[in-house]
Amino acid sequence: MEITKLQQEVDEWIKNIGVRYFNELTNMAMLTEEVGEVARIIARRFGEQSEKESDKNKDLGEELADVLFVTLCLANQTGTDLQMAFDRKMKTKTVRDKDRHQNNEKLK
């Protein structure tokens, strides 16, 4: 699914179920909270911190989806076309990093 379609799906959900968008500042705080939940899972499941019993059933995919959902909300309410921005970013990274990672001794 294209990002544009995801943005439309989120917008329809907000209008039909969510009533309205939270303001941008609230959504930014929510995004930070969701990223923190992803960080907690990664740090405990894949990092060196021990995982609490209550955290073992947390679904990383669900938390990443929360990050995506709030990101899409922010894009919608600020008039950002994420598909265009993502495509542009991939082009920039491809040109800029074409040989950079291939020549990085740390990655071999």
Image (cartoon, grey):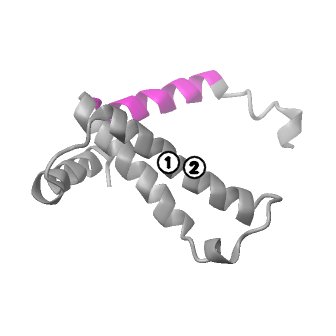
74 or 55, nearer to the observer: 55
Q: Read off the residue under disc 1.
A: 33
Decide if residue 100 is on the left or right side of residue 48.
left
27 or 81, nearer to the observer: 27
Magenta stretch holds residue 34: no
Q: Residue at x 12, y 51 (%)?
A: 15
Q: Residue at x 26, y 36 (%)?
A: 23
Q: Residues within 10 Å of mark 2 (few under 14, many from 20)?
A: some
Q: Amino acid at mark 1?
A: Glu
Element assignment for label 2: helix
Element assignment for label 1: helix
Q: At which x and y percent is residue 90?
A: 50, 33
Q: Read off the residue under disc 2.
A: 36
The circle on residue 12 is none
Q: Residues within 10 Å of mark 1 (few under 14, many from 20)?
A: some
Against 68, residue 44 (above or below) is below
Residue 83 visible, this angle: no
Against 59, residue 39 (above or below) is above
Please state, as top left, top right, bottom left or bottom right, where the C terminus lies in the image: top right
Q: Quadrant of residue 97?
A: top right
Q: Residue at x 24, y 52 (%)?
A: 10
Against 51, residue 98 (above or below) is above
Q: Residue at x 50, y 48 (%)?
A: 33
Decide if residue 96 is on the left or right side of residue 71.
right
Q: Are marks 1 and 2 in contact (CB under 8 Å)?
A: yes
Q: Quadrant of residue 25?
A: top left
Most common secondary structure along the magenta stretch = helix
Range of magenta residues: 80-96
